Amino acid sequence: MDKRTFTNRIVVLDTETTGLNPQEGHRIIEIGCVELVKRRLTGKRFHAYINPDRLIDDGAIAVHGITNEALKDEPRFAQIVDEFIAFISGAELVIHNAPFDVGFINHELLRLKNQPGAVTDLCEVFDTLAYARKKHPGQRNSLDALCKRYGIDNSHRDLHGALLDAQILADVFLLMTGGQSSLLDEGQPGMEGADIKRDVKRVSADRPPLTVIRCNDEELVAHQQRLEAIEKVGGGCLWNQ
């Protein structure tokens, strides 16, 4: 599979909706986004509940647990769209089953009086479901299945939620597309051509001895589970060799 070069800034996005098809009048009721820069979570996020001005299908409520009553005092899409567009513009959007979410977002954008354009006019889009199907052909590639495959704990996920699912998908995306990023970020300003060995500063030999904190059995088990998850990504894990 060809290796993908991602932009510097990535926004992982998920939505919840009143139903399955925007062409039947269904609307977005929740948007959740988390930001990554150089494959690291920055802590920045966008999250909004939205009043859809219509009833939510019972089947949708069973999936995400968001009720009509809970949304009656929330803002309309037109009231949050400027902040949302500012957050995603220029980023590469990472979405699981992107055609679904992008279709709903485009439908909401088309309803606006001043239309800002389609999602693909604002961002590039990367579909983790399409990528997973190529990487793991013939296997289940739902978000839950990928969490199990890559050793990601999603036991706290009883119902779907846009922000929670975006956070989980960020973990899946990082493991599925190459594992942990380098601890020494390449391309940092001022690092071009730096001589790492020459720049190392030695600590004084008179310093007090360092305190050694040894891991407990539970931490050892968690560490081994993470190594096994890295192994599943492919390419082997040096710590297991």
Image (tube, rainbow, N blue to C red):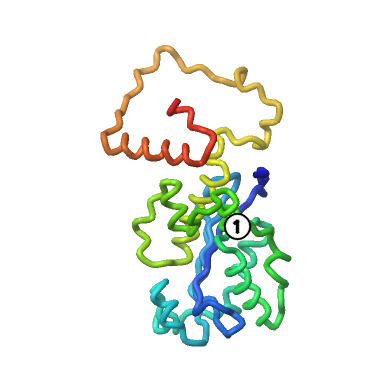
Residue at the farthest top position: 205
Q: Residue furthest left?
A: 217
The residue lying at 43 percent from left, 12 percent from top is 205
| Residue at 44% from the left image edge and 84% from the top image edge | 72
Q: Position of residue 154 (x, y in %)?
A: 38, 55
Q: Quadrant of the N terminus?
A: top right
Q: Is residue 113 above or below residue 126?
A: below
Name the residue at 50% across, 81% down.
51
Residue 205 higher or lower than 71, as above or below: above
Instruction: Report the front residue among 199 and 124.
Output: 124
Q: Quadrant of the C terminus?
A: top left
Q: Estimate the x, y position of residue 188 in percent, counting from the top left.
A: 65, 37
Is 116 left, or right, of 31 in this rendering?
Answer: right
- Relative to 85, 220 lies left or right: left
At label 1, counting other C-alpha atoms closer than 10 Å, the crowd grade (few under 14, some 14-19, many 20 or more) is: some
Vertical relation: 84 (above or below) 216? below
**Residue 222 image-quadrant placement:** top left
Q: Nearer the viewer, residue 76 or 152?
A: 152
User: Mark 1 is on which residue type?
Assistant: Ala
Element type where label 1 sits in the image = helix
Q: Residue furthest bottom?
A: 54
Query: Can you give x and y, in whole percent of width and height, for residue 156 in the image?
Result: 35, 58
| Residue assigned mark 1 | 130
Q: Quadrant of residue 159?
A: bottom left
Question: x, y (%) of residue 35?
Answer: 56, 54
Total tally of numbered discs in the picture: 1
Q: Nearer the viewer, residue 131 or 170?
A: 131
| Residue drawn at the location 68% of the way across and 79% of the way down | 110
Image position of 128 with respect to 19: above or below: above
